[in-house]
Image (cartoon, helix red, strand yellow):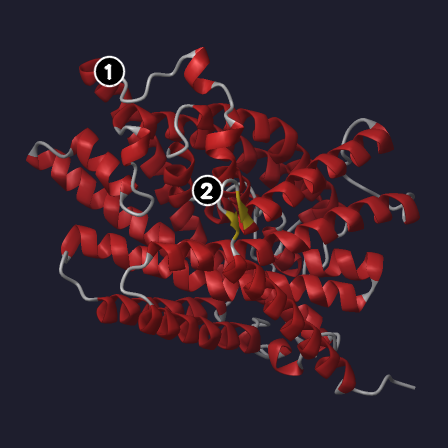
Amino acid sequence: MTDQTQHYKTLKLRDMVLFTVSAILLADTLAAAASVGASSVSWWLILGVFFFVPFAMICAEMGCAYPEQGGIYAWIRDSFGGRWASRATWCYWVNTAVWIPAIYILFAGVFAQMFAPDLSMTWQITMGIVLTWIAVAVNVVTLDLGKWVPNVGAILKVAIFVAIIIGAGFHILDAGMANPLTFETMKPDWSGSAQYIPAIIYGMLGFELVSAGSDEMKDPARDVPRAIFISGVVIIALYILGTIAVLAAIPAGEINLVEGLIDTLSLFFGDSMAGKTLVLVLGLGALFSFFSNGVTWAMGCNRAAAEAAQEGELPRILGIEDPKRGTPVGAAVLMGLVSTLCLILYGFMSGSNEDLFWSLFAFSAVIFLLPYQGMMLAFLKLRKTDASHHRPYRVPGGNGAARLAAFLCMSILAISIFLFMYTPGAGFEWAVVGGVIVTLIIGEVVIRFAENHRKPAQG
């Protein structure tokens, strides 16, 4: 199927930078990080040095050395075989299918906050379902059209972050800091902020996503490292400055993880008519950025799943592509169905239960983080077994530095996975642990089904 499909070379460096910013820069991560308090600034800096930078360098090397359609699936397949690659892709795809409902519930919640405070949960669920199927439609058009959703989303995100940072500057001059930033307050605090560290790590992942569409890139060997480093500088700078801005406005204990963004904008700009208009415009931009986040991750994950299905490692239905556009129709439609089911179940189970929302997020996050361990192991193995392969960019410092970078990433990922399942002082979140185990078991069944129904090998 794949060699008959036309993939259009539409992604330029600019598109790849904006795509990556759209995938990684999350306004909801900003509120979660700021709720830690002043020590969150230190955590951004520490995790930036020991995780964000090594992770970006590894993704840059893998993306330009092995620019294969499917991205993370192809890298793990080439290192450890199709079954392990399929396990990683299954986790990657399921996480997105479960996470999209959460981000669109967030969209509906912010929409209600801005325009319809009495909007019922039924209508919010309906809004999430409509957004899900619009995202499916965007996934099945060609990237020369579909890429504009993440591109515009990235520009709007940057604009929102810049507005918050500028607004904070004026607010500090007028009213001072709501949370003092001193050496004492900014010291990392393991006891009080450990549970939020995974949210910061979660907000740093996604550099590999653009490589899933390598067949649609103009020049991946040249552009992938450049796109990762340009977007990386933009992302970490905006995260740190944005966190400081939120801390300037709202006491850490009063930051609402869902409504914090609009609350902050209203505090900075909301007094005058012009200010209220600006808050409205930025709020609409935030809504579009939530939508674009779902679209961006679906684009990358559906392409990875389609590649696995076409090689017989996942059910064939996931590998169905549009014969003219080369877009992953089967994976996109199935993701839409799973997301819709999750939204309907959410409606039955929840009024607005924040514990359920966190359980859903934590469960999907663990499933999301697991494939990155496989990616790090694939990086190390290919460095050893395919050492002579041309790498337009290499992690600097030789093999010792490459191993250290991978070890740092794997260690921090392991800590994050544990902290999503275990809350210090409260014990294990058994709903999260159970959900992860059930998802992995279903994945094994799906993969074995695909293997048993694989087309006979040629010859």
> Which quadrant: the C terminus?
bottom right
**Camera-nearest label, 2 or 1:** 1
Q: Does the image show residue 148?
A: no
Q: Is residue 266 left or right of residue 3?
A: left
- In which quarter of the view is residue 302 placed? bottom right
Query: In the image shown, does 146 or 292 lie closer to the viewer?
Result: 292
- The quadrant in which residue 133 appears is bottom left
Q: Secondary structure at mark 2?
A: loop
Q: Is residue 150 left or right of residue 445?
A: left
Residue at point 73% right, 53% down? 374
Q: Secondary structure at mark 1?
A: loop
Q: Residue at x 31, y 56 (%)?
A: 107
Side of 212 where 234 appears, left or right: left
Determine crowd level at label 2: few under 14, some 14-19, many 20+ residues with C-alpha closer than 10 A.
many
The answer to which of marks 2 and 1 sits earlier in the sequence is: 2
Percent across and percent down for residue 297 are: 51, 57
* Residue 19, percent from left and from top: 51, 49
Q: Amino acid at mark 1?
A: Gly
Q: Amino acid at mark 2?
A: Leu
Residue 219: mark in rendering: none
Q: Kindly identify which residue carries mark 2.
A: 25
Position of residue 181 measured from the top left corner of the image (x, y, whole percent)? 38, 16
Disc 1 residue crowd, few under 14, some 14–19, many 20+, Cα 10 Å? some
Q: Are marks 2 and 1 in contact (CB under 8 Å)?
A: no
* Residue at position x 27%, y 64% in the image: 351
Which mark is on residue 176? 1
Quarter-of-image position of residue 350? bottom left
Q: Residue at x 48, y 65 (%)?
A: 98
Q: Quadrant of the N terminus?
A: bottom right
Q: Is residue 310 left or right of residue 347?
A: right
